[in-house]
Image: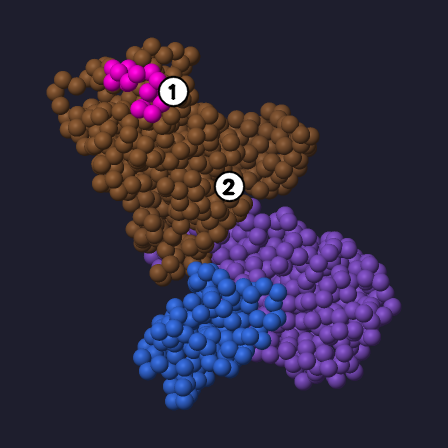
Chain colours: A blue, B brown, C purple
Amino acid sequence: MSYTPSPAALARIERTLALYPEKLAAILPVLHAVQADAGFISHEAEAWVAARLAVEPVRVREVLSFYTMFRRAPGGRATLRVCRNITCTLAGAGDILDLIKDKLGIGPGETTPDGAITLVTAECLGHCDHAPCLQVNGVDHGPVTRETVAALIEELKAHG
Amino acid sequence: MSGAKTVGLTIDGRNIQVPEGTNVLRAAEQAGIAIPHFCYHPGLEVEGNCRMCLVEIEGLPKLELSCSTLVREGMVVRTSTECVRQARKDVLGFLLAEHPLDCPICPKAGECRLQEYYELHGRYAGRMIEPRERREKKLPIGRGLLLDRERCVLCTRCVRFLRGYTRTGELGIFERGVRSEVGIFDGQPVDNDYSGNLVDICPVGAITADDFRFKTRAWFLKRRPSVCPHCSRGCAVVVEFVAGYPLRRSEKRVYRITARENAAVNGFWICDLGRDGRHDIDDGRHDRLLKAGAPAAGLSWPKALADVAAVIRSVPGPERTGKIAVVLNARLTCEELALAKGLFVTGLGSGKVFFADRKPGAADGLLLTSDRVPNGRGALEAGLELRPADLDEIATSQVLLVFGSALAGHFEKQEIARAFAAVPSKYLFAAHTGPLDRLTDLVFPVAVPAEKSGTYVNTDGIRQTFDRAVDPCPGVVPEGAIFACLANLLGLNLGDFDAR
Amino acid sequence: MVENEVRLLPDDDGSWRIEAYLRRNGYQGARKALTTMSPESVVAEVCKAVIRGRGGAGFPAGVKWGFVPKGAAGPKYLCVNADEGEPGTFKDRLVLLRAPHALLEGMLIAAYAVGLRTAYVYVRAEYAGLAARLDEAIAEARAAGFLGERVFGTGFGLEVVVHLGAGAYICGEETALLESLEGRRGQPRLKPPFPAAVGLFRSPTVINNVETLAAIPQILAHGADWFLGRGLPRDGGTRLFGVSGAVRRPGVYELPVGTPLRTLIEVHAGGPPEGRSIKAVIPGGLSAPVLLPDELDISLDVDSLAKAGSMLGSAGVVVIPDGTPMLDVLHVTARFYAHESCGKCTPCRIGTSWIFKTVERLRRDGGGPADLDHVLRLADGIRGRTLCPFGEGAALPVRALILKFRGELEQAVAR
């Protein structure tokens, strides 16, 4: 059961490879492209990336497991990334996170059973003047309140 | 030596001169000072991750790594100050905090750097009361190697070896921070002929060999240097064996062959063929004289050799060229080959001196040569021709002496049987049991290279003289002694020899 | 804000495009450099301006450029550190959002000064949206002839590649950034060799922070003396100071180097909200040891903060209000470093985790003074012993919290 990127992803990957004098240097953008394409990076995808970059698959796994933004198992349609660092904690991020865990019934690192939302905690997102903040699929939200978060979650559940 | 530039520096008050480009750790070594370290290895790329080798360098505000700092003229290094001692304690403290401390069941006990350094540089009361990381303790990673991730100190020697030397790169480091761990990709385990070196270089009991675990203890092993006889590289090895208490017949003595450093021959490494070669020392050995392939009463070395000498003497002088056939092998030492030449060629005038050896294999571009014998060049240097055995010529002989059992690998069993059957007197001098045993009148048990002393000339012409590493069982004799004895019995003067 | 007209950051997100930037005299510094000055004199000018690196280390940018060997054969690279991850820091985000062309112009000048033709902008993955804007700005600049071949009709050209990270704070350390960019785990390298000699793809490389580069055009357009004069003799220019936490007006303030910390917090950021007071201030991102309320009359420059036992770092000021349990602050701090440790070297890999496990236990089950002493000892085992400055970040803030709030912490853990 091997993996091949979609034609669009393949085109993106080939364009990316041309930007680096060494193939391995393109591994992060290539992995991002694969994740955008397939939703996560499977073992087969690791092997594909390794072959395309002409490195041992173990090199791909090294990189994949080092960085936090790659998913190695299927996740939710939406990723909810909640900052838990200093300014956001001072602004009540702990409370917000508890609320989210309550409403979704999952903990950080987990996905709701209906496949709608994956919840992750993050270190400082660089949005401290809008604390407490979070990201939904990479889009910044902040400052959030219990009310706005509750509404956000309802919307995500409804529309995925 | 050429005009290699040297650098003068002071380490712990000692003034020394070392070649330019030496790191402080090696320079200290030369001054007789051992700086503790885990990740540094002279055969691997420097990483500087263990932080154990930190030392004080005058003029620099922080402690510096001795493994990656190169010597400079006038440098003043201190390796034993309170600051350095505390730094070592702290590194040990960290490593041992996240360590299972299961020495009683760890095969590395007795040769483990954590143990050694705690003894020398630790001696503190441990304070770790938090739950330590729990990980897999017996992960097969290929070639009979097992990885214990709890014991691993993440020195990355194993990863660097497979990337830098074998260039096979099977191992990597996964995850991040304290979760970091060594691993392989699914279905792609360690699979190269230098995998045994990983056990040698692992400073702790993280990578261990399945065939060494729970078999013995490091402190029971005697270690003697030798030269590997399994190809013509002649890698420097260490034979590690148990001795000192009575062994049952055919009980294993040799538990390990490990690598020994020799810059001119094998660097720091040996191949797995050489390591597996320890079976050669203990397995399938002849340990007594045999008559027609079976033990018999009344056999003794003096009598048996005297019988052989008598048979040889019975061949009239002029006929000896065509009637005496000898099969030698290139595992014999230079000294033995000189004796053999003196005895069979010069002394007896035999025109039927052949060589039968292990067949060549593929060279691997690293250490293993295609020639799978240690002393082919030694034979040539002795003035012997490496003539392949000719069964027809053998069949028309009156006396046949076969040294080694490799002949069986070159011909069909029936062909050999037929040829031998035509020879009135045939004698085998072999270390290992084999199909030739029953085809000969007498079998004499001989020593393997680890049980001998002598000289080999390797593929590059480098001469290496080695001492006996393991004692042969009583009744097992090196070929050199046999040649000398026969010469004596035949009244031939072979000149000076050393029959150790 | 700043007295005269020249500012790095516009007030809003609406004037980032090239037309607006050109109306603000955009690309004039680069034009002056590329068409009227030699590379050496550009380096000299930037040295004279004493612009200290704005990423955290505070190393003078001109001096760094000068380390690249002249006439070295083969390619050289510029890496822009847009991996802004220091907690409490959000200024580079605003540069990417509102002044991407200032960054590009600064890159152009740097590339010309050092003699390199390819630049990689390493953008943290969490700023993917901003990276998209940067791509647009690059397209604009290229169309206008400010990037690509023969800029300003000279023989000089520059190609820019935007490269996204993937979630690792340590990749903000320059050699870890190089490792990451080369496609490996973001683990720092031993120095020497330094990146100026052996950097990206083993070639001479300059790594600069986003804000540092974005400030370079001002130096060329208005002169080093002008820039230096806006700040202090050993720390020139204005800087983007971020303020967050318990203040009325969190945000980024572009002020002269040397502005007092108290002025930044109380005058510009409006001070704490009604009825609240300041309990502690982190002056330069989480890696900067905490300051007490009576330590706020300090000049915001690299050397003054260092002398006070803290650091200006990324100039991310976090104001901690009264009533904040410092054990919580200690917990967030310890957790961050344990999570972000790359794992390469022993003291950091195990020390950060041990500190966090201990603080976690203290917060959950309580403990005693001996536990706090133990954490101090662990911090001492880390600092000065590690492969990169992450060790200092992991150790010094923890130390400062315990030393400065010892009484409160002992009470908090007593059960």
| Picture mark count | 2
Give the letter of the chain under mark 1: B
Q: Which residue is situated farthest in the bottom direction here?
A: A158
Q: Residue C318 placed where, x, y %?
A: 57, 66
Tell me the SS state at disc 2.
loop
| Residues packed near mark 1 inside 10 Å, few (<14), some (14 to 19) or many (20 plus) | some
Instruction: Please identify the quarter of the rendering in which residue C46 is found.
Output: bottom right
Question: Which quadrant of the rendered structure holds the C terminus of chain B?
Answer: top left
Answer above or below: position of B410 versus B150: above
Whether B316 is among the magenta residues is yes
Separation of disc 2 and disc 1 at Cα? 50 Å
Can I make out residue C352 in this image? Answer: no
* Type of amino acid at the residue the image marks with label 2: Gly
Answer above or below: position of B36 versus C279: above
Give the letter of the chain under mark 2: B
Seen at 32% across and 44% down, the residue is B209
| 2 and 1 marks on the same chain | yes
Q: Which residue is mark 1?
A: B349
* Type of amino acid at the residue the image marks with label 1: Gly
Instruction: Give the label on residue B43, or none.
Output: 2
Whether C46 is among the magenta residues is no
Instruction: Please identify the quarter of the rendering in which residue C65 is found.
Output: bottom right
- Depth check, mark 2 against mark 1: the one in front is 1
Q: Residue C273 placed where, x, y %?
A: 57, 74
Q: Residue C156 placed where, x, y %?
A: 78, 69
The residue segment tinted magenta is B310-324
Seen at 42% across and 12% down, the residue is B495
Answer above or below: position of C80 versus B398: below
Seen at 69% across and 30% down, the residue is B3
Q: Return the disc, 2 or 1, that comes first in the chain's sequence.
A: 2
Secondary structure mainly formed by the magenta segment = helix
